Amino acid sequence: MEIVAQRKDKVVYRDGDKLVKLFDETYSKSDILNEAINQARVAETGLNIPRFREVTVIGGRSAIVMDYIEGKTFSDLFREYPEKIKELLQQFVSIQRDIHSRKHLLLTKYIDKLKMKILGCELDASTRYDFSMRLDAMRRHTHVLHGDFIPSNVILAGDGVPYIVDWSHASQGNATADATKTYLLLHLAGADDFAEEYADEFCRQSQGATTRAYMREWIPLIAAAQLPRASDPARRQMLLKWTEEED
Ligand SMILES: Nc1ncnc2c1ncn2[C@@H]1O[C@H](COP(=O)(O)OP(=O)(O)OP(=O)(O)O)[C@@H](O)[C@H]1O
Ligand SMILES: [Mg+2]
């Protein structure tokens, strides 16, 4: 058994040809089952993702078991090959666009998730209402959205085939919203220059469908929805600042 990642409420480890995500008892059961069903649904779209095996109980704790993918994540690659950052970024964005080209009508609607989180956030009632109205005015789409599309969630297997992991935040909706989410996550991780290069590349590949102005419309809405789960003071500060940005 080899630990792949250790988080505050779960451990991810390799067991032979299997990858096990083992959750703490406190982890919401519905979140675990939702992650598993998202992974099963996304597999039906034909996207290249690790094969789901089972949800099970190990030592009294719930676990999701899937195939282990041998390879390097895009975060490893960006770190190891700084001279190839441009090509890697192009590939990273095109993988995200491939996700967006898929459909699965049973996935949760991103707009509904955003609304629920915005309603539960700490902003004052009139701002929450304003944000909810703005969400209603956004164009409705049904693209598959990853929701946490960051370099550590894409593995390039030994044969050069990319596998996308971590489907806990998957939904369906507007691709520009998903790109904006990635952009904010990169900034939150402190990769400011990279976030800007990423946004430029996403807009370029979208050929006008996504623009920086369109992303700016999404920023306050997506930032507000991140507030309920943000406890780190620096992180909260950034999110609050983004909720105040004018579009
Ligand atoms: N099927 C897999 N095969 C090989 N490695 C995997 C697999 N699934 C996940 N990993 C590795 O384990 C890491 C953690 O898994 P995952 O992203 O699913 O969990 P997470 O706790 O939600 O991570 P994060 O904090 O990045 O959101 C991934 O970044 C990836 O490097
Ligand atoms: Mg992850």
Image: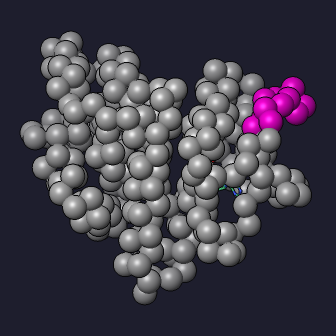
Q: Is residue 196 visible?
A: no
Residue at image x 42%, y 34%?
172
Where residue 162 appears, x then y in whole percent? 59, 64
Residue that protrudes farthest toward the top in the picture: 125
Confirm whether the magenta stretch covers residue 131. no
Tell whether 197 sits left or right of 112: left
Residue 197 in the image: state x and y as whole percent: 29, 68
- In this view of the protein, can residue 105 be seen by the observer? yes
The answer to which image quadrant residue 220 occupies is top left
Total tally of numbered discs in the picture: 0
| Left or right: residue 167 compared with residue 91 | right
**Residue 62 lies in the magenta stretch:** yes
> Is residue 39 toward the left or the right of residue 121 in the image?
right
Considering the image in quadrants, where does the N terminus appear?
bottom right
Residue at far left of view = 246
Relative depth, front residue between 233 and 2: 2
- Report x, y in % for residue 227: 36, 30
| Residue at point 39%, 30% (across, down) | 110
- Report the quarter where the C terminus lies: top left
- Residue 3 vertical placement versus 247 (above, below): below
19 is higher (above) or lower (below) than 168: below
Taking depth in this image into account, of 209 and 122 the one nearest to the observer is 209
State the image coordinates of residue 93 (x, y, percent, origin top left): 39, 62
Predominant SS along the magenta part: strand
Magenta-drawn segment: 54-64
Residue found at x 68% / y 21%: 29
